[in-house]
Amino acid sequence: MRALHRVHLTQALQNDDRFETVRFRLAGPRERGSYRVVGSTRTNWILEDPDYPATDARLEVGFTDSPEDTDYWYWMNWIEPERSFMLGWHRDDDHPDLGPTHLQITQGGSVVDRMSVDPIDEHPGAIFYRRLEQLPNVLTRVIWDGDDLVGFDT
């Protein structure tokens, strides 16, 4: 099943002209799941804001079957290397107090804020497209103080 997720995600990003390069990689030792599909992009499409403070980003997505139930675990991260910023949806068992799915923002390797979000209990393709559609709105809810990440505007 995971091979189909990987193929579908790779094709989805390759067919989306907002992504310049797409590649597959194995998950690193500190990452959950077994793989990531990575799409490199420019940020100008995400908010259509010429003053957005980063120009380059990448989207990293991985899925796996949950060992406990029929739902999918996933990690979908928007990463802006210029600001050491990561925003990610994670469905896993790392933070049971937040429920099955949480949204997390990180700067410089340190988690700044996490919040519970509604899970999407659908096929990985549907999860991917719905989260990608939500990305611009979620990015506008991130609060910055100059170059320092503050948290989510709730």
Image: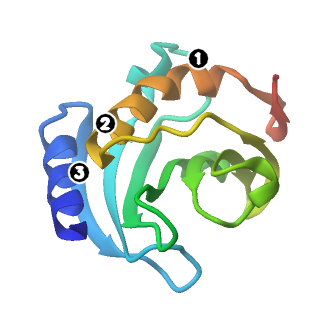
Q: Secondary structure at mark 2?
A: helix
- The image shows residue 71 at horizontal and vertical percentages of 43, 55
**Disc ID at residue 126:** 2
The amino acid marked with disc number 1 is Asp
- Mark 2 → mark 3, Cα distance in angstroms: 11 Å
**Residue at 58% from the left image edge and 17% from the top image edge:** 51
Residues packed near mark 2 inside 10 Å, few (<14), some (14 to 19) or many (20 plus): few
The amino acid marked with disc number 2 is Ala
Looking at the image, residue 30 lies above or below residue 118: below
Residue under label 3, please give it: 9
The amino acid marked with disc number 3 is Leu
Frontmost of labels 1 and 3 is 3
- The image shows residue 32 at horizontal and vertical percentages of 53, 73
Q: Residue furthest bottom?
A: 29
Sequence order check: which comes first, mark 1 or mark 3?
A: 3
Residue under label 1, please give it: 51
